[in-house]
Amino acid sequence: MATRLKNIRFSNWFTLLAIVIGISGVMLSFYGAIRYPDFSYGLHSDYKNSQILKDEITDISTNVARLTQLKSEEYVKIGVAISDNELKRKIDTIKSEKNDSIVHINEEYKDLIAFYDQDNPNEFQRLTAERDERIAESKQDYDKKIASAKDELIAEQVVEYNKAKRDIEIYEGLYYTVVPNGTAAGTEAEFYNTLPYFTKSSDFNEGILYIGFSEAAFTKQTEQYDVRHQNGLTGIYMLLSGLGGIFLSLAWLMYSAGRTPNSEELQFNFFDKVYLDIGLLIAGMIAMSSCFIATIMEVKMRNLQVVNLFSLLLLVIAYLSIAVYAMMFAKRVKSGGVITHTLVYQVYKSIKTTINKMIDITLDLPTNRQAFTKKAICFLLLYTVLLGMIGLVFLILAAGLHGIIGLLAALALFALLIISIVSILQKRVAAFMALAEGIKKIKNGDFNHKISARGFSTLDTMAEDINNIADGVKAAVDREMKAEHMKVELITNVSHDLKTPLTSIITYSDLLSQENINPEQVKEYGEILKRKSVRLKQLVDDLFEVSKAQSGAILINLEELCLNDLIAQSLAEYEEDFKNARLAVILTLPQDKIMVLADGAKMWRVLSNLYNNAIKYSMPGTRVFVDAEVVNDNVNITVKNIANYIMNFKSEEIFERFKRGEESRTGEGSGLGLAIVKSFMALQNGSSDVAVDGDLFKVTLTLKR
């Protein structure tokens, strides 16, 4: 079910559905905006408390204040409404324009007059006269404006008065009254209290301003507002629904970007080859250009239907460009390459790589004088070309941009370049210091210290080589210390195991040399001497045998033999010994014969050592399991027994010479049995392994078939 759902949600049909939802959202928002544009009416349902009515009252108050100030058109025309300050400001403005005009004319002729001052007196006089004539004309024009300044102000006030009057008259059923300061407003207050709506403004310039509407007019305005309120709500709902569809569509496209039903890996297409910053620039330009063209068409074209159709088409194109970029961005976020897949980063990376290569060339100069000269010349030429290109970029920036902006842009780019170079050099120096510190630590014996890579090819190669040398030295030191430890332990164990029978032989030899010894004691002491001598001989023979095996100085005769027969015959030899030790042997062999390439005598000795080990160290009354099985091209022989002591040794240590699991060394074992097993198995291209699980001791032998 989950797989089927995944196949559906990442299918092309779902992507197409998301795009259709997004385009529908654009169309719905656009229709809501052009069909119900009065969004502000939808914010308040009550006309009395709406911002629309507050704005209307403010507009009425402003116009009433202007009408009160200007009084009437006849009053304005006689110039009484113009204050001395207004007239002075108007004249000062004209005088300032007059001075600016004179300065502009002088600047226009300044260079020409200076150029012809000495070389061409006639032209100099002509230009001077022309300049003076233009200045005189300009002064005359502005003097006329100063003379007619009051008339111009009167004309402006007449226009203002008529406009304020028209703006007041558009309101049906409007009443307004200005009660002068210090005058009682009893009658006016009673009248306005009878109206369905009125306002009272106490901070009016001329006194108290009452504004109200008749019942019929206010009812009509309320009904008109209610209609616009419903239209505004409809427009808001359509706009929000459309935007919701757009965001939902973009969210789904980003979620499913790069996913397909048949693959877990991200899938990239042609658009994904475009760098993200370039894609953002292109998508932004398309979206902004579409909106700009739509605005221009609305202003220039008269056919509203055509304008709306083309505007909608351009908005759909803008949405599609944003959707494509959103999918590109989402894929890079999922793949973790947002920063690296930008043109800015690639340029920075190229500059950084070039600088690093140049530094590597500098650090890797040869010792040969001729080669040194050639490389130094190439190095200087490379630096010269790079700096020349950078300088050219700076000049282009300075020339292409205007004045101080171009200079600042060039300086900013140059500062950025210097900072990048200093940063790279600082990191290179830090890498050198880390390399030197690491070499010092390793020299002082800290072979576990690792010199980390810093991203510089030459230094990283050196660091890796030094780390490898340290690892090799550490491994050699560890092997030497282990060999020294084994040597000391070997001498100790050999001394102990050889000393025990030798001491007994010396002791009983002294007893035999006494004169008052009887024949029975002679016989007893002789048996002990024989047993200890045999024990000593066995120790010496085993020691020589394991030493020869580990040094490779022993003859191996590999031949094909039947492992089933070898195991069965060797067990038959030890049947009586297992019975005496009260041990039951469980033998498990496959029915088919197992043929292996081995040395029969050496394998017999290996099995004998394992049987002897089990007889000596198994708990009486338990079972010993001997198994053989074929695993691929190998044959595994397993001997398992329950130990009669606590095994507190490591598995890899038990194969060492003179190593015993029972550390008291009071038994008859030599500690060489398993060492011989390991050496003989290695000579036959096999292996041996020991596993300990509680009291279970398990030896596994592996041979090639």
Image (spheres, helix red, strand yellow):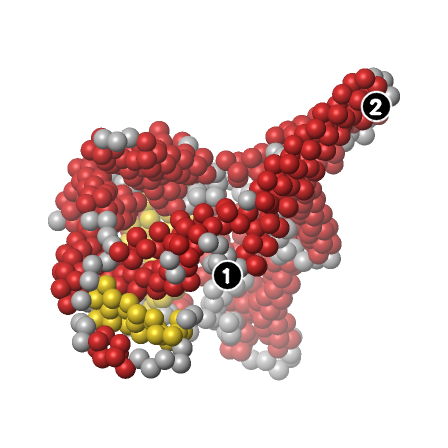
Give 395 or 585, whichever is nearer the viewer.
395
Point out the residue furthest to the right here. 118
Q: Residue at x 17, y 64 (%)?
A: 218
Where residue 226 appears, as percent x and y from the top left, is 15, 60
Q: Residue at x 51, y 72 (%)?
A: 663
Where residue 484 appears, as percent x and y from the top left, is 65, 59
Residue type, mark 1 in image: Glu
Q: Which one is closest to the eye, mark 2 or mark 1?
A: 2
- The residue wearing badge 2 is 117
Q: Is residue 542 visible from the viewing direction of this image? A: yes
Give 447 or 473, whichever is nearer the viewer.
447
Q: Is residue 602 visible from the viewing direction of this image? A: no
Specify the quadrant of the image occupied by residue 13: top left
Q: Residue at x 53, y 49 (%)?
A: 150
Horizontal relation, residue 33 to residue 600: left or right: left
- The residue wearing badge 1 is 653
